[in-house]
Amino acid sequence: MTVSNAIARPELFWISGSPPSWRVMLALAIKGIDYESRLLDASSSAHKTAAYLALNPRGQVPTLRDGNVVVRESVAILAYLDARWPERPIFGADPAAAAEIWQKVMDFESTLRPAITTVAQAIFRNQISARIPELSSATEMASAELDLLEEGLHGRSFLAGDRPTAADCVLYPGIAWLARAIDKSSADGALPTATRALLDNRPVFDAWRDRIEALPGFSSTYPPHWRNRN
Ligand SMILES: N[C@@H](CCC(=O)N[C@@H](CS)C(=O)NCC(=O)O)C(=O)O
């Protein structure tokens, strides 16, 4: 290994408030991997420059660059991090644990994440009144999935056991985005009551969120522009 390799750190290209970027930042914090933060300014379309498109042709975040290796897609980046730095595994220490973590990740991707996206986009794009039917079915889906997640958390600290895993990295930012969207809409009476109440009265779920927020390094992952309440 050369001296420059020894000191080289992976670079993470990200945008403040991007849930997929946040997944990777949580994984880096949990695994204790030091990295170069490359925060892109979305308002000036820094993710659409020729230089960035050469790394990520979709012009999306996150992207991880580790020497000559460039990885896009948040879950692929999590898998790369675990293979590259196997200490403190986030995809399980044995096949059964890995299966459970992947199941939680894929369940979220195919059910709760699309429902959260429907709700959050309707709120942030000021389309609540125009999208009531989609909001109702998304709320029904999200509520059922949140119930299942809560059930699974009984007697456990994290989604797949006593240690944080990729499942927590993937789900937490999506839930935080939903919470922020509902919070932002609080003055808007048009949001259906059931949608507004999606995260209410979920003490087991709240305790899980608190545990994630208490993890070492969590605060450095928190979207900077959310701190300013914008
Ligand atoms: N499936 C991708 C989704 C990435 C994604 O949608 N990123 C958004 C930010 S949350 C983005 O870069 N949007 C800018 C654009 O599409 O122009 C992943 O998980 O990494």
Image (spheres, helix red, strand yellow):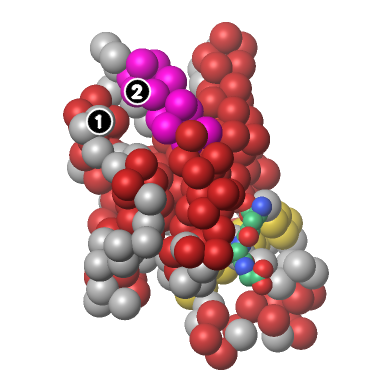
Percent across and percent down for residue 160 are 43, 21
Residue 148 location, quadrant: top left
Residue found at the far bottom of this picture: 44
Percent across and percent down for residue 140 are 48, 34
Q: Which residues are magenta?
A: 141-153
Question: Which image quadrant shows ligand 1?
Answer: bottom right
Q: CA distance from mark 1 to mark 2?
A: 8 Å
Nearer to the camera, 52 or 205: 205
Quickly name the residue at label 1.
202
Q: Which mark is residue 115?
A: none
Mark 2 packing: few (<14 Cα in 10 Å), some, or many (20+)?
Answer: some
Q: Which residue is drawn at the image coordinates 52% and 86% (left, top)?
A: 43
Residue 186 location, quadrant: bottom left
Mark 1 packing: few (<14 Cα in 10 Å), some, or many (20+)?
Answer: few
Q: Which residue is drawn at the image coordinates 63% and 31% (left, top)?
A: 106
Nearer to the camera, 9 or 52: 52
Label 2 CB less than 8 angstroms from ligand 1: no
Quickly name the residue at label 2.
150
Residue 112 drawn above or below residue 157: below
Percent across and percent down for residue 135 are 51, 49
Q: Which residue is drawn at the image coordinates 38% and 46% (left, top)?
A: 195
Specify whether 120 is left or right of 71: left
Secondary structure found at label 1: loop
Q: Amino acid at mark 2?
A: Glu
Mark 1 and 2 residues: CB-CB less than 8 Å, in contact? yes
Q: Is residue 79 magenta?
A: no
Residue 45 drawn above or below residue 2: below
Specify whether 164 is left or right of 214: right
